[in-house]
Image (spheres, helix red, strand yellow):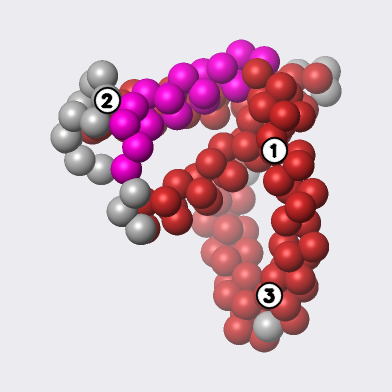
């Protein structure tokens, strides 16, 4: 994160706005979970799936130092569009094809991770901490 001008607003400002918007979308997801309808749950699940894909690609793009003009503004606009019903459109246009293409590789890596004893140990420890700290606080 830098405060250079690679778009309309300074990068640091667009990153801050994105974080605030994501917090609001998290709240909207919570409200959707608390309703009895499944349509809003599916919409927010699709949103967060696509957001995780964006974050994955963003990591690799920035790892190699690639910068795109107006990237932060475009990402913010895409997130807002997806939050207001566009996530299904984006998923059907791009997301589903990418995930179907990558599904086998994801399954292989997931299976190998689950067979790894160290991974199992870390997962158990994480679950234990979650149950001790978070679940206990929620009661």
Q: Is residue 55 left or right of residue 114?
A: left
Q: Which residue range is magenta in the image?
A: 67-85
Q: Which residue is mark 2?
A: 7
The residue lying furthest to the bottom in this view is: 117
Question: Dot 3, crowdedness within 10 Å: few (<14), some or many (≥20)?
Answer: few
Q: Is residue 60 something that shows in the picture?
A: yes
Q: Is residue 127 above or below residue 65?
A: below
- Kindly indicate the quadrant of the structure image that contains residue 128: bottom right
Compare marks 2 and 1 and give the one earlier in the sequence: 2
Q: Which residue is mark 1?
A: 95
Q: Is residue 2 left or right of residue 115?
A: left
- For the N terminus, the image quarter is top left
Q: Nearer the viewer, mark 3 or mark 1?
A: 1
- The spot of residue 39 in percent (x, y) is 80, 19
Q: Which residue is mark 3?
A: 113
Q: Is residue 136 above or below residue 75?
A: below
Query: What residue appears at the point 57 percent right and 66 percent down from the top-left corner?
Result: 126
Compare marks 3 and 2 and give the one earlier in the sequence: 2
Between 9 and 135, the residue placed more toward the observer is 9
Between 136 and 134, the residue placed more toward the observer is 134
- For the C terminus, the image quarter is top right
Between 115 and 132, the residue placed more toward the observer is 115
Query: What residue appears at the point 73 percent right and 65 percent down from the top-left corner?
Result: 105
SS state under label 1: helix
């Amino acid at each position: 994160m830098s405060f250079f001008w690679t778009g309309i607003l300074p990068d640091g400002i667009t990153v801050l706005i994105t974080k605030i918007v994501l917090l609001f979308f998290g709240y909207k997801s919570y409200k959707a979970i608390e309703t009895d309808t499944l349509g809003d749950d599916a919409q927010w699940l699709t949103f967060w799936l696509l957001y995780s894909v964006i974050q994955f690609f963003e990591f690799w793009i920035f790892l190699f130092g690639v910068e795109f003009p107006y990237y932060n503004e475009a990402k913010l606009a895409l997130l807002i569009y997806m939050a207001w019903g566009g996530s299904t459109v984006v998923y059907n246009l791009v997301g589903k094809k990418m995930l179907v293409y990558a599904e086998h590789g994801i399954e292989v890596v997931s299976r190998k991770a689950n067979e790894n004893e160290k991974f199992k140990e870390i997962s158990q420890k994480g679950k234990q901490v979650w149950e001790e700290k978070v679940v206990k606080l929620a009661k």
